[in-house]
Amino acid sequence: MKFLCVFLVSMPFFSISQEYETEYIDTSKTKVLEEIIVTSYRSESLRETSLNITSLKIDSLSRYGNFNLTDLLAKTPGVNMLSTGIAIAKPVIRGLYGNRVLMLISGLKFDNQQWQEEHGLGLSDVGLSKVELIKGPMSVLYGTEAMGGIINLIEEEKPKTNTKESDFSIRLNSNTAGGLMQYGYKANYGKKWFRFRVGIDNNADYSDGTNKRVLNSRFDGYQIKSTYGFIKKNWTSTNNYMGTFNRYGFIFNDVYTFIDADARFSRKLNVNPCHLVLLNILSSENKIQLKDSSKLFLNFGIQSNQRMENEGGGAISLNMHLLTIQYLLKWEKSLNQHNKLILSNLGSFENNTNFGSRKIVPDANMQESNISAYLESSYKGKLVFENGMGIGEKIIQTLLTPTVNTPQKDIHPFTKITPNYNLYSGMTFFPSIKFNVKLNLATGVRVPNLAELSSNGLHEGVFTYEVGDPKMKNEQNVSFNVFANYKLKKVEFSLSPFYNYFLNYVYLAPTAETWYGFPLYRYKQQNAIQYGTETTLTFRPIEKISTKISYSGMISKTIDGNYTPYIPAQKISSSIHYLFHISNHSPIQFYTNADFYFKQYNIAPNEIKTGQYWLWNAGASATFTGKTVTYIFTMSGNNLLNVAYYDHLSRFKYFGLLNIGRNIAVNIKIKFNEKQVKGK
């Protein structure tokens, strides 16, 4: 409590989170319009949906010095990141991660074999315009895995009609002597538009709060994106391509004895162990306006995901390829002035194939389909009810794979067919611009993944022998979510409690058995409960200053009384944001914030406790606009006091490795102003 009191008293000296930075506007000169979100059943304003959804504007020229996309999302209350260093991170929504959180790209499910904790997603914030984040289940529309929430990545918007624009930016990080470079070009010819963007990032090993180098934590990546869109009568189509290649240094228990230290800022990734992720994604988003005033939406795409491991010396041992073909079809019809009906159908086919000598899971084919119906009813423009139901099925067929499921192994090839059903019921009430309250009750479902069903081997990333169980049942949850927001001219308050009840929660449990000296773990199931809250208070004493304080905390236990692994520590963020003008130039912004993390002693069996700590961050940004070019400068400092700490959701704590120390990031973006082009 002593530290809590210090934070409350010192609130005016600290800064805001990512969420507020994106929405702070000089309202004396600008009319603020309600933002439209697209992740739910239909495009609507945030307060008109019963979903607990947050919209975050994203720019790879981040003012917060983040090393990855997940790090940026984790500045939102209730969102954390499960990390293996600064490069490998998975989003955690209210204690759920991996196959319990669904990521969308171009409106389609992104599957990157995320069931392994020590592998990165292979995604970057390069070329994104915003992220929409749903807390709570949405399996009615998106099928399995949308249990804990949804993260929808939305690409940058097209420029104004008959204009073209381009930009170049560079980011430098002091801690890793690395950074990011990118270039983008886009043009809109009225009925046609396109864009092209390339990026490259490269970082050496990071140093912790004791200035100790964390050997082999280096990483690099290459990104390319392109879009071609067109309008033909009542048909609008946006077609995207994304290709990325990322390499991440591989950290394990005895990294300092296995690897000889090279030059401090060496970037070699072809000698020491590393992960490699190669992604290629083609997708098409289509909207057709039908003659009866209804709308038809069709998204379809193909994803190629190749995941490899170099265990030293450049030789690839693990080589898995996941091919995914999928579609999402929605039909929307206004029945009358107050009621709207949406019908949807999704389908996917996945093939997992091993090409390397080392195998973790068997070759497999997977198929999924889901149909749903959703009715939205509004009353007097102040109250909206949303109700939906969906049914689906998923088939997993494992194939005979040497060293994994051969006759001498305990688990043999199998075919698993699992039906599922989901319900959603919600209400949002917004009697005025000042007040909004949302309630929803929803179910989510997840079919145990390949690792949980069919693992039978040594998991070298964590040095455990893991055994799956093909007889496991579907994991199902029932979730109750509340969101209340009250907003005045100078004060805004929001509260968001939640409660989850899980049937057949899947977890990895230690046993008394060993395999050649390695501990043996088995996947098991048990019912579980999860509850917590997030709350935020914002105060704007004068027009140009905004202060904010937020809290998030939760509990997650299985029915036998044990805590589940990786429960995020309670967190308080306190902040201030200051904006001012110099003559006729664009505003200059300053921010500073402090995050306080409580000790986390609510741990699963064999998990490590972590102590309390706090981090201080600060930064500034300025924009200067000329006749043909706009310059944007930002500087940010994270962990300015160089605190030595273990984040509770860092896997490095098991290796005795601390999180990153002080880092100063400098960003420069050169934006070539809009130019007119002739329509085509």
Image: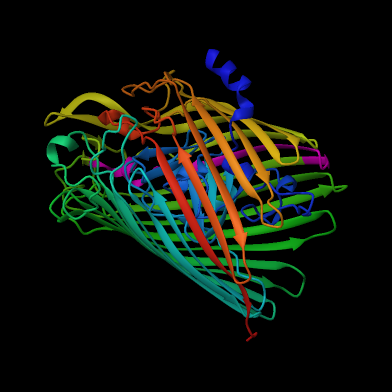
Q: Residue at x 62, y 21 (%)?
A: 8
Q: Which residues are magenta?
A: 429-456
Q: Residue at x 46, y 23 (%)?
A: 557
Quadrant, the N terminus:
top right
Relative placement, left or right, of 496 versus 662 is right
Q: Residue at x 54, y 13 (%)?
A: 2
- The number of numbered discs placed on residues in the rendered structure image is 0
Is 335 contained in the magenta span?
no
Relative placement, left or right, of 56 versus 450 is right
Asked if residue 160 can be seen in this view, the reply is yes
Q: Is residue 578 above or below residue 69?
A: above
The residue closer to the viewer here, 544 or 325, is 544
Q: Is residue 163 above or below residue 361?
A: below
Q: Residue at x 74, y 45 (%)?
A: 47
Where residue 17 appears, as percent x and y from the top left, is 58, 39
In the image, farthest residue toward the front: 583
Quadrant, the C terminus:
bottom right
Q: Please, what is the dominant secondary structure of the magenta stretch?
A: strand
The residue closer to the viewer here, 547 or 407, is 547
Where residue 563 appears, as percent x and y from the top left, is 43, 22
Where residue 344 appears, as percent x and y from the top left, is 61, 59
Is 444 contained in the magenta span?
yes
The residue closer to the viewer here, 616 or 33, is 616
